[in-house]
Image: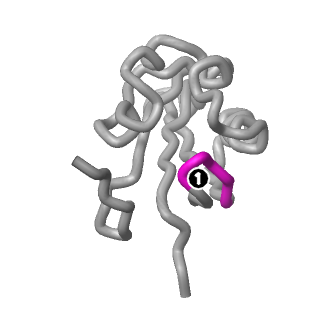
Amino acid sequence: MEAKPPTLATPSSGAFHFGPGHLILHGNAPFLEAFGPSCVGQPAREALVDLRSAAFDLMDEVYRTGRPLARRVRTRLGERRLVVAPRRDPETGETYGVTSHLALPRRG
């Protein structure tokens, strides 16, 4: 069966990354389909070899500053919008990880 091209209705691939090394602790179904289930438990830089260094620089900045950011990145599937948001401890406010979403870029 031939894969359908992604549309705006297609769920974006998303993952939770823990710590400054962005250890992948969880990925949704589109993420696991894109990068493989063996990426869970690995640092993002080692597991997500299809992404360019700008994607990891963005994750580093969000982890360091605690502010969500987004940028366009090129992937083997074409241009995507990478959105990275901090995950904070509710008691201390300390950033302990980030979530990432790779979606089709917004048009308009």
Question: Which secondary structure lies at badge 1?
Answer: strand
Q: Which residue is found at the position 71% from the left and 35% from the top?
A: 56
Quadrant in the picture for the C terminus: bottom right
- Front residue of 33/105: it is 33
Residue farthest toward the bottom in the current orientation of the protein: 108
Q: Is residue 96 above or below residue 8?
A: above
- Front residue of 38/85: it is 38
Residue 77 pos. (x, y %):
54, 52
Count the marks.
1
**Occupied quadrant, residue 8:** bottom left
Residue farthest toward the front in the current orientation of the protein: 1
- Front residue of 60/67: it is 60
Q: Which residue is found at the position 55% from the left and 28% from the top?
A: 97
Amino acid found under the numbered disc labelled 1: Leu
Residue 8 in magenta stretch: no
**Occupied quadrant, residue 38:** top left
State whether residue 106 appears in this view.
yes
State whether residue 65 appears in this view.
no
Q: Is residue 70 left or right of residue 5?
A: right
Residue farthest toward the top in the current orientation of the protein: 41
Q: Is residue 103 left or right of residue 73?
A: left
Q: Is residue 74 above or below residue 47?
A: below
Q: Is residue 58 above or below residue 4?
A: above
Q: Which residues are magenta?
A: 72-77
Q: Is residue 2 above or below residue 44?
A: below
Residue 89 pos. (x, y %):
48, 28
The residue pinned by badge 1 equals 82
Q: Which residue is found at the position 54% from the left and 46% from the top?
A: 85
- Front residue of 9/88: it is 9
Q: Is residue 2 left or right of residue 76?
A: left
